[in-house]
């Protein structure tokens, strides 16, 4: 019964330095992975929407593999299996790389759907104005399709952030690992879980609120 | 096939796979039952109940599932010794908390999408609130719920691997322990590392379970739109 000794304030004031470092690491890994999965999603999503040969098929294989296998197994593969064939990644690299690969797969689906939702006649109008294929993509498909894809891609970024907690299995000192390790030492389990809950919910809820705000601000004029 | 593969495969399939299936089955059934009830109750215009269920949904959809697993596995026993669970049931409970929140949200949307007239017609036939939802509204909403349900099943099967984090022996943990065993010197192991082959096989196994289901979900989704 640890409830009788529950003291959140003491826990935070004694461990705030480590917890803050953990949070910074969570945010650092998330930021790198989100930026990377944005670029992967944009490029591969465009390749799929425009049916660019080879790249499009390879992307489909990549997306299906990532979507249909647990991310935890993917992390194990990177961290515990790759050294067998001579590729050694440290915990930090594994952390951002694994969630970036995961997020990139989901994000390329988000962007593909967004770009495919742009009516063909808009692109034809772009061609008629004298834009080439790239010009049409940058000036017509991207601004419209990107806006359509934005809410679902932010949802993917939220999942990326949540998935950084899985780095507990490779011992990378992000927020979850830090808090649980302190709890194991001091037995302040409930306090550690409270901190985790509050911080993650604050992050996730504010990102969700951002989606709702962006959704109404970036909505296409015709759907308003 | 090398000599070591047989016993490894047997252990993973006989000890790991059943636990994965047990966690997944319990989590899907539990999520469906709690989620459908919560989702339907959420459509009632009664503020306190709505706020409670809304809070439940937002909390368990917002937390990383691993944190929910820790709350169940480490947090509940700290509250009361009677709430102590083994890793496998603890994972199933955590997945039910997360999954039921997903189902509740989907159910709410599906129930709201059923036209008013259906409610009115059912009331005119003499159904009370429970009968109206049980026999008229939910059967129609279920069609809409089917695609998210199949997606949920895929997610639950994949997230059952979280049991490995707290030492529950399911597919991933079973294969991890075999990778470790093989690195020992004989007689326990063979002093070799075979992580790529074993974790690769686990990926293939999950893919074989998930891929048909994600196809099915996509198919059901398309059929719904038409």
Image (cartoon, coloured by chain):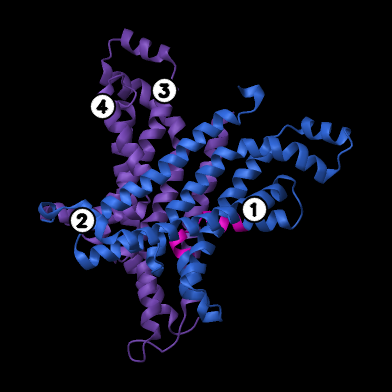
Look at the image and say whether residue A67 sits in the magenta stretch. Answer: yes
User: Quadrant location of residue B34?
Assistant: top left
Separation of marks 4 and 1 at Cα, in angstroms? 43 Å
The lab-note entry on whether marks 4 and 3 share a chain reads: yes
Q: Earlier in the sequence, mark 1 or mark 2?
A: 2
The percent position of residue B42, horizontal first and vertical second, equals: 32, 27
Q: Position of residue B124 (x, y in %)?
A: 32, 7
Q: Which disc is residue B112 wearing?
A: 3
- According to the picture, the residue beneath numbered tag 1 turns out to be A39
Of circles 4 and 1, the one toward us is 1
Q: Is residue A201 left or right of residue A159?
A: left
Q: Residue at x 67, y 37 (%)?
A: A145
What kind of secondary structure does the magenta stretch mostly adopt?
Answer: helix
**Circle 3 or circle 2, nearest the eye:** 2
Q: Which chain is blue?
A: A
Query: Which quadrant, please, contains the N terminus of chain A?
Result: bottom left
Find the magenta span and give its range.
A62-74
Q: Which residue is mark 2?
A: A10
Front in this rendered view, residue B190 or A88: A88
């Amino acid at each position: 019964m640890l409830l009788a000794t529950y003291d959140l304030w003491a826990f935070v004031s004694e461990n705030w330095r480590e917890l803050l470092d953990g949070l910074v690491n969570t945010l650092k890994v998330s930021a790198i992975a989100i930026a990377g999965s944005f670029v992967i999603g944009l490029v591969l999503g465009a390749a799929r929407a425009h049916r660019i040969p080879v790249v499009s098929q390879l992307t489909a294989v990549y997306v299906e593999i990532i979507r249909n296998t647990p991310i935890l197994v993917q992390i194990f593969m990177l961290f515990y299996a790759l050294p067998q064939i001579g590729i050694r990644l440290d915990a930090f690299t594994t952390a951002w790389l694994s969630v970036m690969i995961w997020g990139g797969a989901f994000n390329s689906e988000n962007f593909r759907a967004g770009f495919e939702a742009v009516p063909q006649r808009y692109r034809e109008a772009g061609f008629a104005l004298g834009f080439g294929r790239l010009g049409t993509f940058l000036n017509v498909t991207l601004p419209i399709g990107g806006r359509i894809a934005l809410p679902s891609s932010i949802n993917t970024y939220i999942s990326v952030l949540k998935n950084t907690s899985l780095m507990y299995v490779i011992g990378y000192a992000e927020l979850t690992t830090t808090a649980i390790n302190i709890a194991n030492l001091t037995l302040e389990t409930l306090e550690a879980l409270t901190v985790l809950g509050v911080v993650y919910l604050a992050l996730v809820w504010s990102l969700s609120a951002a989606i709702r705000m962006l959704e109404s601000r970036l909505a296409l004029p015709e759907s308003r | 096939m090398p000599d070591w593969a047989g016993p490894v495969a047997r252990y993973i399939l006989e000890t790991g796979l059943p636990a994965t299936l047990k966690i997944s089955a319990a989590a899907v059934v539990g999520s469906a039952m709690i989620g459908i009830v919560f989702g339907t109750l959420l459509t009632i215009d009664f503020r306190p109940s709505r706020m409670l269920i809304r809070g439940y949904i937002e909390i368990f959809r917002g937390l990383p599932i691993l944190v929910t697993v820790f709350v169940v596995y480490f947090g509940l026993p700290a509250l009361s010794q009677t709430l102590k669970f083994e890793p496998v049931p603890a994972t199933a409970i955590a997945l039910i908390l997360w999954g039921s929140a997903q189902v509740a949200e989907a159910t709410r949307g599906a129930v709201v999408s059923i036209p008013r007239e259906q409610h009115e017609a059912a009331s005119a036939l003499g159904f009370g609130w429970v009968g109206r939802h049980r026999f008229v509204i939910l059967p129609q909403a279920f069609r809409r719920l089917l695609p998210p349900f199949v997606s949920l099943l895929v997610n639950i099967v994949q997230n059952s691997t979280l049991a490995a984090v707290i030492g529950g022996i399911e597919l991933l943990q079973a294969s991890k322990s075999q990778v470790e065993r093989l690195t020992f010197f004989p007689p326990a192991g063979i002093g070799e590392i075979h992580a790529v082959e074993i974790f690769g096989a686990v990926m293939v196994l999950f893919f074989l379970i998930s891929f048909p289901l994600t196809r099915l979900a996509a198919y059901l989704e398309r059929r719904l739109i038409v």
